[in-house]
Amino acid sequence: MNENKVVSAIRILSAEAVQKAKSGHPGMPMGAAAMAYAVWGREMKHNPADSKWPDRDRFVLSSGHGSMLLYSLLHLFGYGLTIEDLKQFRQFGSLTPGHPEYAHTNGVETSTGPLGMGISNAVGMALAETVMANRFNRRGYNIVDHNTYVILGDGCMMEGLSHEACSLAGTLKLNKLIALYDDNEISIEGSTDIAFREDVPARFRAYGWNVIDVADANQFENVDAAIKLAKLSDKPNLIVCHTLIGYGSPKQGMASAHGEPLGEDNIIALKKKLHWIDKEPMSFAVPEEVYQITAKTAQAGAKAQEKWQKLFEKWSEKYPELRKEWDIWHSEDLPVDLLNDESFWAFEGKAATRNSSGTVINRLATKIPNLIGGSGDLAPSNKTYMKGQGDYSAEDRSGRNLHFGVREHAMACICAGMKLHGGLRPYCGTFFVFSDYMKNAMRVAAIMKLPVTYVLTHDSIGVGEDGPTHQPVEQLAGLRAIPGLVVFRPCDSHEVAAGWYAALTQKRPVALILSRQDCQLNEKSGKDALKGGYIISDSRKKNPDCILIASGSEVELCVAAQTLLKAEGIDARVVSMPSFELFDEQSEEYKQSVLPSKVRARVAVEAGATLGWHKYVGLDGKVLGIDRFGQSAPYKFLFKEYGFTPEHVCELAKETLKK
Ligand SMILES: Cc1ncc(C[n+]2csc(CCOP(=O)(O)OP(=O)(O)O)c2C)c(N)n1
Ligand SMILES: [Mg+2]
């Protein structure tokens, strides 16, 4: 049997699907087909009948634009994608969207497309593997023992994100990471020579990677031999694969093969060159022999899983306690009833919400064994450290505190990768203003509905002296605009506990926005915060004269303003609104009970951009926010200077009452 026919099938199906869609990227799949076959057909441990087998090797197509490569593989190896699905490439509602989408197409391990992200997710997956292996493997029972394969191209290599992630992977000696670089020296604008001349292998060696060169990676045997070497390495592996974009077509080696259909004539020429069974440009014909070969791989994969299952059962018998823990780690449900655990919700006195978050993380550390996380070199400021839980490193895989270094974008992608791997509950922290460095990763985590927690501290001009570069202004509005991301800005310690509870129970990412400065503890705050918005200090009347709405550190300001208003005979209600998203999802009835439509005199107060608050205050209301950059000064001075005083809130409330 001729395995090269599988390689040809990948090339041809990919070209045909792009041609049929009149849209997409044929060149990459054609150039990387041999690399991909070496992985999928020769080296990767996978069972197409069970894409969720916990000990499968992971595969990430970091060059997400080459999605047809992945779809051709998923079809040929029997993951359930049909020829009909391939014919629907890039069409509305199909299983073959433009870029691979996690939880949409069976066998897709992560959503890719933003270059540099897949390789960074893969670093997270490889990291997770070491954590799980360290925790659960016992002598003779390697129940966690798998590789993470990645195919990435010049685009991923140029993107700064991959530099961050790969540098960390080298430091952490993630040797089960096997990255295959599709080094075709072409990207959209032409030869990579116009913008990218560095010595990539030298850079990766400097990171601490094992680098293997494959001079002709258009032949799968050459790539296979390199993967075999990589498996012996004690460092992460980069297999530099010299390939030809658009291999086999008249456009081979040309940038024009990157992102447009080849044209029917060129597909006919491709089929001739590869001695294909037909010469029709869009027949999607695959010889039976190809399926016979891939079926063998599938059978071997099923056998491998059966063998693993037996080992897993023996291990479960021998280590029942460990098995219980395994089930806990793999469950989306919390292992303890945090909601009714009063010790979880108990706090005293005022505290910066970042400090309360540190307290909560440490309360959780003993209750949630698979909680793992860290900061981008700001743990002492972000309060992300779990005391007594060790530091994860190349030398110690048992530590639960991760040190990401100053690499925010990679940090967020690595956390996504850890979550995608399964078994872990990752979190990561930095200054809120630097969430901009992580934003695309947060966005894609939201697309994937991944419950990753972001601990973002120093949340406003409350930063003070560090000045405008460090004082977030528009970040709240920016993150709130991301569909599916829960943004939670607690006003005190009780609400911090609620924020963490939400983070651990929501089936989507949650960003906790935390203060540097102290916040008063409110007696009424607490679990109601899980509704996103609630009455924290009520009016006397059911329909108050006016409503003051705030989040975070500005809630206590509104409570103080309420007292001033009362002295003037004005009956105000204070609503704490830690999360727009959670509040908006409540019933109409509940929302009306908090913000009755009748009451149009409303003031929203938040030390950030006003954008977004108008939906709660309406045309008659007012928003006290900050629509400018901050300044370097002690924070108390700045709050006063920018009008964040009870007196000013009071004035604004009275103005709304005049309308
Ligand atoms: C972060 C990011 N920037 C830009 C793009 C748009 N884009 C898609 S593919 C590509 C070029 C990628 O070059 P390469 O990885 O060499 O792919 P090849 O041309 O070899 O298929 C670009 C710029 C993107 N997907 N992600
Ligand atoms: Mg390229």
Image (tube, helix red, strand yellow):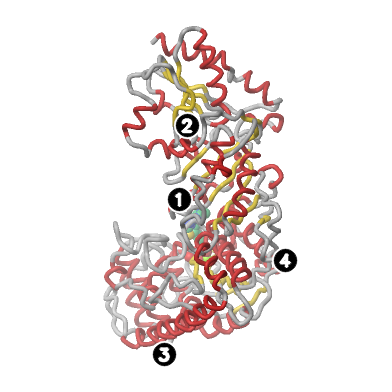
Residue wearing tag 2: 577
At mark 2, the secondary structure is loop
Amino acid type at mark 1: Arg
Occupied quadrant, residue 619: top left
Neighbours of disc 3 within 10 Å: few (<14), some (14-19), many (20+): few
Which residue sits at x=49%, y=53%? 451
Q: Are marks 1 and 2 in contact (CB under 8 Å)?
A: no
Residue 422, percent across and down? 51, 63
Instruction: Identify the mark at residue 206; answer none if there is no mark.
Output: 4
**Distance CA(mark 2)–CA(mark 3):** 64 Å
Instruction: Identify the mark at residue 508; answer none if there is no mark.
Output: 1
Occupied quadrant, residue 410: bottom right
Residue wearing tag 3: 2
Of callouts 1 and 3, which one flags the residue occurring earlier in the amino acid sequence? 3
Of callouts 4 and 3, which one flags the residue occurring earlier in the amino acid sequence? 3
**Distance CA(mark 1)–CA(mark 3):** 45 Å
Image quarter (top left, top right, bottom left or bottom right) of the C terminus: top left
Q: Are marks 1 and 4 in contact (CB under 8 Å)?
A: no
At mark 1, the secondary structure is loop
Query: Which is nearer the eye, 535 or 548?
Result: 535
Query: Which is nearer the eye, 481 or 97?
Result: 481
Which residue sits at x=69%, y=47%? 379
Amino acid type at mark 3: Asn
Neighbours of disc 2 within 10 Å: few (<14), some (14-19), many (20+): many
Is the distance from the Cβ of mark 3 to the nearest ligand 1 atom less than 8 Å? no
**Distance CA(mark 1)–CA(mark 2):** 19 Å
At mark 4, the secondary structure is helix
State which mark lies toward you, 2 or 3. 2
Image quarter (top left, top right, bottom left or bottom right) of the N terminus: bottom left
State which mark lies toward you, 1 or 3. 1
